[in-house]
Amino acid sequence: QAQLVESGGGSVQAGGSLRLSCEASAYPYNSNCIGWFRQAPGKEREGVGTIITGDGGLFYADSVKGRVTISQDIAKNTVYLQINSLKAEDTAMYYCAINPGTRWCPPPSPENFPYWGRGTQVTVSS
């Protein structure tokens, strides 16, 4: 079973940047779909983007396109989410999740990803 551990969250002022990390272990790294999601208080969990591990195929949600970059370090079994020009509405718990053993990513809806990390909090102050 995959184990995912997020890190890199914190408090930042609007306009700043953060890079979140998602270390995937206990599973072959390549050929999985890893998704980044976020959930703000009182709101549903929403998909931010996805990456095919190894292959590097990417997808970004329209709500964040242009401000986020998903990348990977294969040697470290780690996927990153870089968020730039942070806004107060980016405040949320950020999660990574995995749909294992696939060379394509399903739509970034939470129900398509069976394994989740515990999340890392991002708080943006204006």
Image (cartoon, rainbow, N blue to C red):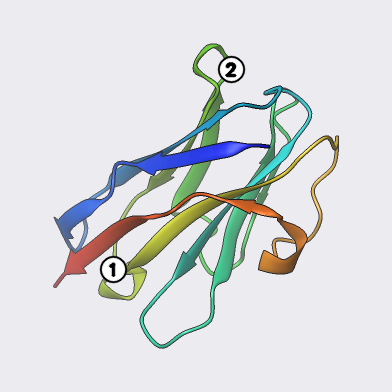
Dot 2 or dot 1, earlier in sequence: 2
Foreground of the two, 50 or 85 = 50
Among the 4 quarters of the image, the one containing residue 11: bottom left
Q: Amino acid at mark 2?
A: Ile
Q: Secondary structure at mark 1?
A: loop
Q: Secondary structure at mark 2?
A: helix
Q: Amino acid at mark 1?
A: Lys
Left or right, residue 78 beside residue 51:
left
Is the residue 48 above or below the residue 40 in the image? above
* Mark 1, other Cα within 10 Å: few <14 / some 14–19 / many ≥20: some
Q: In what quadrant of the picture does the N terminus appear?
A: top right
Is the residue 119 above or below the residue 39 in the image? above
| Residue in the picture at 64% in, 37% down | 2
Query: Looking at this rendering, what residue extends furthest in the front direction?
Result: 1
Expressed as whole percent of the image width and height from the top left, the position of residue 114 reads: 71, 55
Report the residue marked by disc 1: 87
Is the residue 81 above or below the residue 12 in the image? above
Expressed as whole percent of the image width and height from the top left, the position of residue 27 reads: 67, 27
Left or right, residue 40 beside residue 3:
left
| Residue in the picture at 50% in, 49% down | 117
Is the residue 20 above or below the residue 27 in the image? below
Q: In what quadrant of the picture does the C terminus appear?
A: bottom left
* Alpha carbons under labels 2 and 1: distance apart: 30 Å
Of badges 2 and 1, nearer the viewer stands 2
| Residue 9 badge | none
| Residue 74 badge | 2
Expressed as whole percent of the image width and height from the top left, the position of residue 77 reads: 55, 22
| Residue in the picture at 49% in, 17% down | 76
| Residue in the picture at 48% in, 55% down | 95
Expressed as whole percent of the image width and height from the top left, the position of residue 80 reads: 47, 36
Among the 4 quarters of the image, the one containing residue 26: top right
